[in-house]
Image: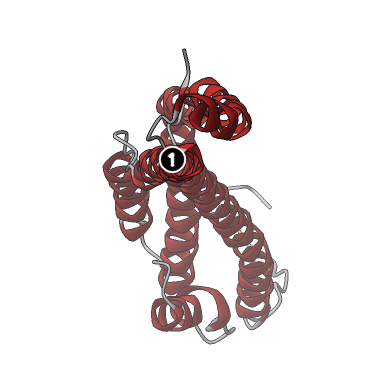
Amino acid sequence: MSRRTWIQYCAIGVIAMTIVAPSRAHAQWAVFDGANFGQNVLQAARALQQIDNQITELANQAQMLVNQARNLASLPLSTLATLQSTMVQTTVLLSQAQNIAYSVQSVEQQYQQAYTSISSGMSDSALFNQAQTRWQNSVGGFEDALKLQARVVGNIPSDSAAMTQLVSASQTSAGALQAAQAGNQLLALQSRQLSDIQAELAANGRAADLDRARQVANEAAAKAQYQHFAQYDAYVPETVSVPNSGN
């Protein structure tokens, strides 16, 4: 029997005793205060009801604490170290750029030397050396772009595995904190992938720009060579006598 049912039975008994007890006490001269007893039973029932309410409240508070503990539980999975390692590898590749580095100062200095300092007064050997430097820069730029593309493609399997783990962790998270942490790591993975794309676009753009600059500089060098050649006197035919020719 539950506490609530027991309380109801006690209340019914109290009402019955308050009705029956006075008549029986008058007939049999019994010394029994039914009204007082009923009040005591009602007070006990109310006290029991209060205890029952307190127990229910404590149970609710305990469940709330359990839910809070779940929401504050940290995600056991972390892909941060892997993401940082991958970004470091990409950064190292960018820092190993051949000839003309990803630096404003380096670009200004080396570009001036090999691409814009062309004049007709330069010797053929100087023009040839500049042309060779430009060719090496273009080849190095394409090689750097290919290396970076290989790195980005090599990251795809690890990215796929990390994404699968994070999505699974988010779906099976015990609380709000774990779900939020899984979501944050997914955003970090996407940010790293965007960084790879940005680096690849920069490498491809660098290679294409170096090659276009080489073509323009070669045109300028060709004009300089023509002007240099045109400075010589034109050929003038002369009569040549051949010995023992009989003429």
Q: Quadrant of residue 103?
A: bottom left
Q: Residue at x 73, y 69 (%)?
A: 237
Camera sees residue 162? yes
What amino acid type should be assigned to the residue bearing mark 1? Asp
- x 42%, y 62%: residue: 133
Answer with left or right where residue 13 lies relative to residue 143: right
The local secondary structure at tag 1 comes to loop
Q: Which residue is nearer to you in this view: 151 or 111?
A: 151
Residue 15 location (% of width, % of height): 61, 32
Nearer-the-camera pick, 168 or 158: 168
Extreme-top residue of the structure: 1
| Left or right position of 89 against 156 | left
User: Which residue does the image show at 48% across and 18% down from the upper left?
Assistant: 2
For the image, the number of numbered tags is 1
- Front residue of this view, candidates 72 and 237: 72
Residue located 40% across and 37% down the image: 59
In-front residue for pair 141/187 = 187
Residue that badge 1 annotates: 33
